[in-house]
Amino acid sequence: MQRFLIFFLFLAACQRPSSPLRVESGFYHWQALSRLDSNRIEVLKRPEMGPLYLRLFDIDWDEQWQTAIPVGSLQPELFPSLPDLTVVPTFFLTNRTFRHLKKEDLDALIEAMLEKTDGLLQELDLGQIKLWQIDCDWTESTRQLFFEFCTRLRDRLQERGIILSATIRLHQLKYSDRTGIPPVDRGTLMVYNTGKISEPATKNSILDLLEVTPYLDKSDNYPLQLDLALPIFAWALVFREGKLVRILNPLPPELEQDTSRFLAEEDTWVAVKRSTFLNGYYLYAGDRIRLERIAESELRDLAALLAEKLPAADRQILFYHLDEHNLEAYSPQFWLPILEQFQTP
Amino acid sequence: MNACGPSDDLGFQGYSFLNPGIVLSQDSIANYFIRFDDLMTAGFPEVEVRIQDNLSEWQASVCEVATVEDIRRVVYDSDSKQLSVLRTAAISKSQTLPLNFRDNGFAKFIQRNQCRETVDYLLFAKACEPYVGAQNPWKKEKRDTKKMLELIDRGRKEFRKTDSNYMRLRYTYQMVRLAHYAHEYDLALELYDFLIPKIDIPRFGEEGEEQTSLIYYWLLGHKAGALRGLGDRVQASYLYAQVFAHCPSRREAAFRSFLLRNDEEWEACLLLCQNDEERAMLYAIRAYEKDSRAIEEMQAIYKLDPTSKFLEMLLVKEIRELEKDLLGVEFNDNRKANKRYHRRPKSDAGEYVIELQDLARQYWEEKDVKRPKLWQMAEGYLELIAGDYYAASQTLREVQKFTTNPHMEEQLEVLLLAAQIGGFGEPTDSVETIAYNIRKGNEWYLKYQSFPDYMRDKFTAMYDEMKRPGKAFRCQHELADLRSNPQEDIILDLMKILQESDPSPLERLFTENPDGSSIKNDLHDLRALLYMQDNNFEAAFEELREIPRTRWGDYGVFDPFRATLKDCISCPHSLDSIDLYTRGAVVERILDLQYQIRARPDSNAVFYLEIGVALYNMTYFGHSWNVMDYYRSGSSWRYLRSGKEVFHLYGSPFGNRETFDVDLALYYFEKARLAAKSDELAAKATYMAAKCELVKFYQSTAYQEPPGANQIPYIPPEYAENYQRLMDYYSETIFYESLIEECLYFRSYALRQN
């Protein structure tokens, strides 16, 4: 971890005067129940660090209540005080919420969001909030209501001097004429989950560079300023009789270490040798598990591709997501070249 | 024949012949297992079950004379003020019942029998409600721990004052629940351990079938929650398993809370079990997980207790999964959609069905299971599912010889029928006769809803194999489904059946409409339509002549020879019935006009024009489009430039064909103009030709939709030759004047040119 800190100091020192582009790095924190340990907090508090996109809660449609409700709220008691940290409250909204919600319910939802968020931020003892981000994989059928939600939320946030960002999927970038441009102040392009996760033939559903390239063709014309979210997570996908039955996230180390239960096969596949419980899920002998992670070289190639294809701009390079496993999977020397790719105009 | 066209519904489409309701006992846990799919998709209305079960227990334990509805009004719908008055009424004869309880049997019972303890408990439960009920999910959870602890103290006092075992149990439940929700887990366990020994846990029900109070299991669920809160997953899961086994109203919640993280915890939980039945329950819960491969758990349960009821439940669960994977998969007409949207069949299903067959055979051969014949029947059904219809029939008949249970007999008859249909080799006359008789009179065919689809799909596949497209089509569709895009091979195949001297009953069915009338005329009409779409009017007429002239009117009347300045699809047709033609008469008229053209070469312009008008009007763009088509979709307009003529249409297997071609009409208008002896006639012909040019422009890549819906598009010169001709040569005609007045497009064009 110490090497990691040194890297960021080095990064700050290495800002080339010839480069007018301001490139910040940052992380997503997505887990509700994960305790943010002091090591990670120290990293986040360094002055050269960019923001922490902190998922506060999801919003989902609830059949019992017949309304949109918050799900999986962050537990503030697991977080120490973070007054000096730049935090971006982040929310995942399910698409089905917008399938059920009515236009007349939007204002009430926004007010409830604001109130709950205020409460959580107060408990977290954070500094001033300047940006919110919403994450929703909207479709053509929900676009209208989602965009109306964005418009109204943006108006409410503007009253507080806060701007609104939305995540943009690759397909939403490429087919923006069909999917539309969300009425927000800026976007974050999510450059991961590019492959078909449930397809056994997929090599790595988190990232396949060949899949990414065609989606970037029209990025020049995209009207929103785009930050980038790059994957640094790893998971294991359990296939039974050819069907994806479970995602083990994060990737359990036993799959690669316990040879009494698991047998490494070709590529990134592991076979279950004998039936066993793993992280509360019962695996049967014969199950096959695809391990997915992003190698340093792949992330470097991805950064090079994005730097080449996207118009040069000030932007944030965000890594999804911050937990103890993901951070330690990458060497401290690895991050600098990635950010440098985007600093050259 | 009941048609069942392709469905746009993306739900799984397959068959099932296993009737779990008659295979399994009517046990609540069996129902839970076999309703697996429903639970996973629809959620389980456990809250309502909980209320109903609670009210039933109030009725059984306190007041059998009151209705459940009366008990509900007192227990759930009353407030503490009303309950206080009820309490006074229970101890003082001078106090009357509250107004809303005067006709309530439960309240009267409480008053009459002075059930003070009951009302005291209800008052206590009402006081607990705000701290244990569902809270607004948007508000931060506010459990007032101090108040909750005060209530627990009050509960302890009430407990001591109470004689009734049942009320003591309920007090304990309320106190443990309060402690659990207050996150005072140690207190919850302490209360449980201290109070439960002081209660003789009540049991209800008929003698010999008594069941422990459900409140005890609710209480156990909260104890499990407290253990889980303290990190003792093993103890908690063991208790959740007890709740799962004995308490339907908390079964789903217990299943979701059951969590063992590793093999060590699993083994520890097994060690907590008091007997093999409890151990079997743990395996059953593990196997209940979605996507489990339950053979492993079945083997474990079999070792513990071959007569365990869970074995049959898991067998049914696995068979239902395999039905989705393999039953009739070789002829299921939805197999592509099932593969695409549901990933069925799973890649190893073929191996798994053999494994399960082996298991079933082993179990019935060893005869240790409760019902060996059920397992033998399962083996037969699994052979059927695997597509070995002959072996399935043999096995099932073997079971049938020794079966006297009427439920099993029914199931065997159903499976044998499924094996018979699945095993049909070729659709010979005798097979068709058998199928016809099954359709008409087999009680199982009529009772089990999968049979019609199963039969249709099987015969469709056989007819496809035999290159009998008409028969294959009729297995799935009514003839009317062919109208939007008639297919010649289907029409000819069905005509072939009509020519047969001794058709089978099934073939006769194929050549009948739902009302029993013959489809003969309809086939000729459809074939004539095909010829007309090819502009082959002589052949069309020959087909139409096969229909008695008196029946031509059955297929509609039209007025395609009426020329209009503007095309209006939805405008009413001529009210003058003299102008209306049947389809046969339209073709006859066109053929007559073609004869007139040849017979009267000096004055044939008017005939050319009349044919052209009819041809134009019968296309997609004209008001009489329905002469040459049975279905016109307005949305096809959006795809004019796609070059396609056939479009998706819900319920239509071949889509919807539109007639966009105006070339022949344009040819006749050109001939009319050139042959015209008057400028008026030539102007009319030129204008109609211009209309043809305009729709050709719409179909060309040169056309770009204008940004405004009402904006008249710019027409490039190559598509405006006749507009220009009208301006250059016929501007002095009366027709031109009316055109300028009525036709916005032409007026706009003329203005742009000037």
Image: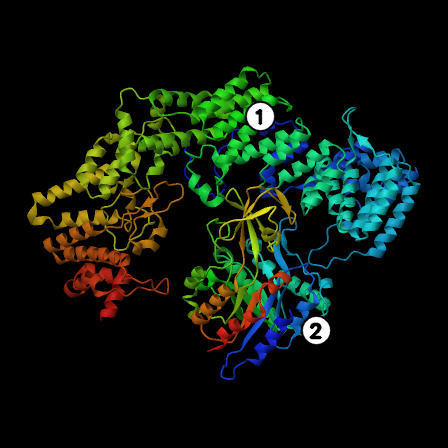
Residue type marked 2: Pro
* Quarter of the image where one finds residue B490: top left
How many numbered marks have been drawn onto this rendered protein structure?
A: 2
Q: Could you tell me which secondary element the residue under label 1 belongs to?
A: helix
Residue A203: which disc?
Answer: none
Q: Quadrant of the C terminus of chain B?
A: bottom left
Q: Could you tell me which secondary element the residue under label 2 belongs to?
A: loop
Q: Position of residue A141 (x, y in %)?
A: 49, 55
Residue furthest to the left: B602
Residue A83: which disc?
Answer: 2
A152 left or right, relative to A209: right
Q: Characterize the local packing of mark 1: few (<14), some (14-19) or many (20 or more) Cα atoms within 10 angstroms.
A: some
Which residue is at the front of the view, B162 or B266? B266
Kindly check if marks 2 and 1 are in contact, taking CB atoms under 8 A apart as contact. Answer: no
Residue B123: tell me if it is visible: no
Q: Position of residue B206 (x, y in %)?
A: 77, 25
Residue type marked 1: Gln
Chain containing mark 2:
A
Chain containing mark 1:
B
Instruction: Decide: is B445 above or below B530.
Output: above
Residue A112: tell me if it is visible: yes
The residue to which callout 1 is attached is B362
The CA span between labels 2 and 1 is: 68 Å
